[in-house]
Amino acid sequence: FQSFTNTYAPVEKLRKLYTNALSFNNVVGLSIGTRPDCINQSVLALLKELSEKTYITVELGLQTSNEKSAFFINRQYKNEEFKKAVKMLNSVGIDVIAHIIFGLPHETKDDMLNSVNYAVDCGIKGIKIQLLHILKNTRLAEIYKNDPFKILTLEEYCELVVSAVS
C-alpha cells in the first residue's frame, strides 16, 4: 500500500482495504508505506490486530535526518516524529523499514550516512535507499533548472550504499 491507500484514511476504510487485500490466497502479508506523522493510536491498534494474523511491515519516509534538508524538501515533520512512529510500531511488534534518499541537494556524504545511522538508532528493521530523481514540472525541477546542484553519479551512489551497509 502506498500513497492515498496507506494510513491517511479513516481506520474503518483502512480495515476494509487491508482485509480485502489479505483475502486473496496468495497474499502472505502487507507492506504499508506511509508518513511517520500518519501513525496514531487508532491506526496502531488496527495494525497490531492485523499483525496477529499476518506479517505486516510499515515503511516510513525519513528521506534525511538533516533537518535543513528536510525543510528544503518540505517534509513537514521533524526527526522526532519519525523516532516516535518507529517506537510505537516496534512496541506492537511491527517491523519498520526506513525510506532514505541519497543525493538530496547540498547534502554531504556524512549527511547521507548520518541519516542511515539515525534510522538504525531509532530501531528500524530494514532500509530502502533511493537515489534522488527529479521529476519534470515539480518545484525541485524548477530549482534545479535555475540553480543546478550536484547530482550523484551511479558510481557515487553505489559507493555510498556500500558504505551505508558496511
Image (cartoon, rainbow, N blue to C red):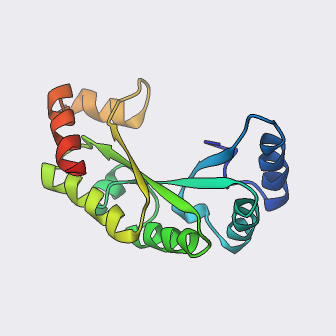
Relative to 127, residue 124 above or below: below
Q: Is residue 129 left or right of residue 106?
A: right
Relative to 123, residue 105 above or below: above
Q: Is residue 67 left or right of residue 9?
A: left
Q: Is residue 100 left or right of residue 77?
A: left
- Which quarter of the figure is the N terminus placed in? top right
Residue displayed at 30% across by 63% down: 67
Is residue 106 or residue 90 the one in the foreground? 90
Q: Of all residues shown, which one is farthest toward the top?
A: 136
Which quadrant holds residue 69? bottom left
Horizontal and vertical percent position of residue 128: 40, 45
Relative to 38, residue 91 above or below: below
Horizontal and vertical percent position of residue 26: 74, 34
Q: Is residue 137 left or right of residue 142?
A: right
Is residue 160 or residue 24 the one in the foreground? 24
Residue displayed at 69% across by 74% down: 41
Horizontal and vertical percent position of residue 122: 38, 70
Residue displayed at 67% across by 68% down: 44
Q: Total of numbered circles in the picture?
A: 0
Say whether residue 41 is visible: yes
Relative to 13, residue 87 above or below: below
Is residue 42 or residue 30 the one in the foreground? 30
Horizontal and vertical percent position of residue 30: 66, 47
Say whether residue 149 is visible: no
Which quadrant holds residue 91? bottom right
Residue displayed at 32% across by 55% down: 64
